[in-house]
């Protein structure tokens, strides 16, 4: 969960909790109840995020967040290039959607691979220009 994406998810979850609580009690949710639900949801999200950081370590967690953000950005680009959006995908038949999702994931993987390759080649060129050997690349692929 990215920090920005997490914040909007917390607000949405808080409003949903307040609305469900109001429907169950039979009276409309007050602003105070909505604020409390929002604060509770934010605290839960923060606790969850801190738990993830403790479990994975700050570096691994940050790398995971960067990769997730990169994948989301590339997904948006791919959808825009294909002149479609999430709503269109959601409206597809399950078989068609699975096929489209697979195609999108393959394109995301291809673009990430190309970006890593271009980065490595750039580092190798820079090192060669300085008369040094290229730096070794360490990729943490643990999940």
Image (tube, rainbow, N blue to C red):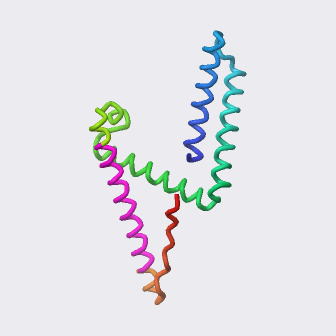
Q: State the image coordinates of residue 52 (x, y, percent, origin top left).
A: 63, 51
Range of the magenta residues? 99-124
Residue occupying image coordinates x 49% and y 74%: 137
Image-based side of 35 in relation to 7, left or right:
right
Does 39 appear above or below 26?
below
Q: State the image coordinates of residue 113 (x, y, percent, origin top left).
A: 38, 63
Does 128 appear above or below 103?
below
Residue occupying image coordinates x 42% and y 70%: 119
Depth check: 105 or 10 in front? 105
Identify the main secondary structure in magenta.
helix
Q: State the image coordinates of residue 38 (x, y, percent, origin top left).
A: 66, 30
Image-based side of 109 in relation to 5, left or right:
left
Residue occupying image coordinates x 68% and y 27%: 37
Is 112 in the magenta?
Answer: yes
Residue occupying image coordinates x 62% and y 29%: 14
Q: State the image coordinates of residue 53 (x, y, percent, origin top left).
A: 65, 54
Does 137 appear above or below 17?
below
Is 66 in the magenta?
Answer: no
Image-based side of 132 in relation to 33, left or right:
left
Depth check: 71 or 93 in front? 93
Does 17 appear above or below 129?
above
């Amino acid at each position: 969960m990215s920090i920005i994406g997490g914040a909007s998810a917390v607000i949405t979850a808080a409003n949903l909790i307040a609305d469900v609580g109001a429907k169950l009690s039979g009276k409309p949710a007050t602003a105070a109840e909505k604020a409390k639900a929002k604060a509770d949801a934010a605290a839960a999200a923060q606790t969850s995020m801190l738990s993830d950081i403790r479990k994975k370590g700050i570096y691994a967690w940050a790398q995971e967040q960067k990769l997730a953000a990169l994948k989301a950005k590339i997904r948006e680009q791919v959808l825009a290039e294909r002149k479609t959006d999430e709503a269109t995908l959601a409206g597809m038949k399950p078989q068609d959607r699975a096929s489209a999702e697979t195609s999108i994931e393959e394109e995301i993987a291809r673009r990430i691979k190309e970006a890593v390759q271009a980065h490595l080649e750039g580092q190798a060129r820079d090192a060669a220009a300085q008369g040094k050997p290229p730096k070794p690349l360490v990729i943490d692929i643990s999940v």
